[in-house]
Amino acid sequence: MPLAHCFPRSLAALTALLFAGISMAQVDTGTILGSVHDASGAVIPHAQITVTNEGFGSRWPVTTNDAGEYVVTPLRIGTYTVEVSQPGFQKQRRTGLQLNIQQQLVVDFSLMVGEVSSTVEVTAAAPLLQTESGSVGQVMQTKAIDDLPLNGRNYTFLARLTPGVTQGQPEGRGLNANGWFEANGTRAAQNNYLLDGIDNNSNSVDFLSGAAYVIKPPIDAISEFKLQTNAFSAEFGRAGGAVLNATLKSGTNGFHGSAWEFLRNDKLDAADYFLNANGQPQGAFRQNQFGVAGGGRIIRNKTFFFADYEGTRI
């Protein structure tokens, strides 16, 4: 397995990076599969398929079976190029294929007779429906996580934007203020939280910690997450409610990063009407959320790093 898929992707796991690689769980990855046939529709067995991660440069060579089909899994989420070649046919390449968490991305090819030295670039829109899986849910990608208004910078609040999901029943322990949600009428305590394929559920009795999860990474460190509310695969045990499956960003051949400071201060707020009417001073409130995140390469196409930090002062 390439080192790009063995190294941890968060600062919390940086110590482990110094001693041993960590294998990647399949629940936070995806699959690319498809078939190869000629212009008449006849299948092409034993065609050479190469799947390349455009961020890492990692490559997975496979061949189609006797039915002209291929499957490459597990793959880290990201952008991929798939290339197919077969003697007597023009080589064909599809680039910019976005693979999401738990997605089964179908990439079919129809080869034209011609010289192998010529290459046909194919660009096609992503399918509107995921026909390879019956699970019901929604993927939240980096742009939505970063751009949507999110008071407190807690990504679990975005789960409430999925159809069939709402906030938890009224309570006085602060759970709703920490992202508590219910899916399809099930109890909020029946949800399953995963982070990079690892159990992220709080086992505190009655959730005395005030949250159903253990670790809440900064939203700038989250690559994407998928909330599955029904008919999800058996590999997701435990959950009677929904599965919130998040994965962290990773380093790539290019360097990328961000820094942030979010300030809330009562000096910048308008005075409350009723406090003014009663001659009372405005209550003090000052909150700072700040941090950095960044990643890149150590050895091109082989070794990568990603780290993040966020502090909160209230």
Image (cartoon, rainbow, N blue to C red):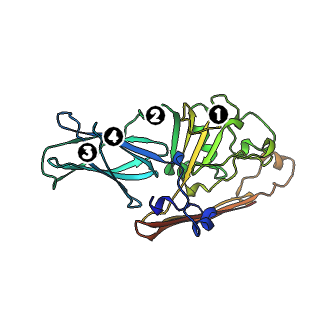
Cα distance, mark 4 to mark 1?
32 Å
* Quarter of the image where the C terminus is located: bottom right
- Assess whether mark 4 and mark 3 are in contact (beta carbons under 8 angstroms): no
Give the crowd class for mark 2: few <14, some 14-19, many >=20 residues within 10 Å: few
> Which quadrant holds residue 118?
bottom left
Q: Work out whether mark 3 precedes mark 4 in sequence or the reverse, and give the earlier one.
A: 4
* Residue 306 picture location, percent across and down: 54, 64
Badge 2 vs badge 1, beta-carbon distance below 8 Å: no
Lateral position of residue 156 relative to residue 175, left or right: left
Residue bearing the label numbered 4: 34
Give the numbered dot on residue 218: none
- Camera-side residue: 173 or 69? 69
Residue that appears at 17% across and 33% down: 40
Name the residue carrying label 1. Answer: 241
Inspect the image, locate mark 2, and give the three-letter code of the amino acid beneath it: Ser
Q: Which residue is mark 2?
A: 133
Local SS, label 1? loop
Instruction: State the CA–CA distance, disc 4 to disc 2.
Output: 14 Å
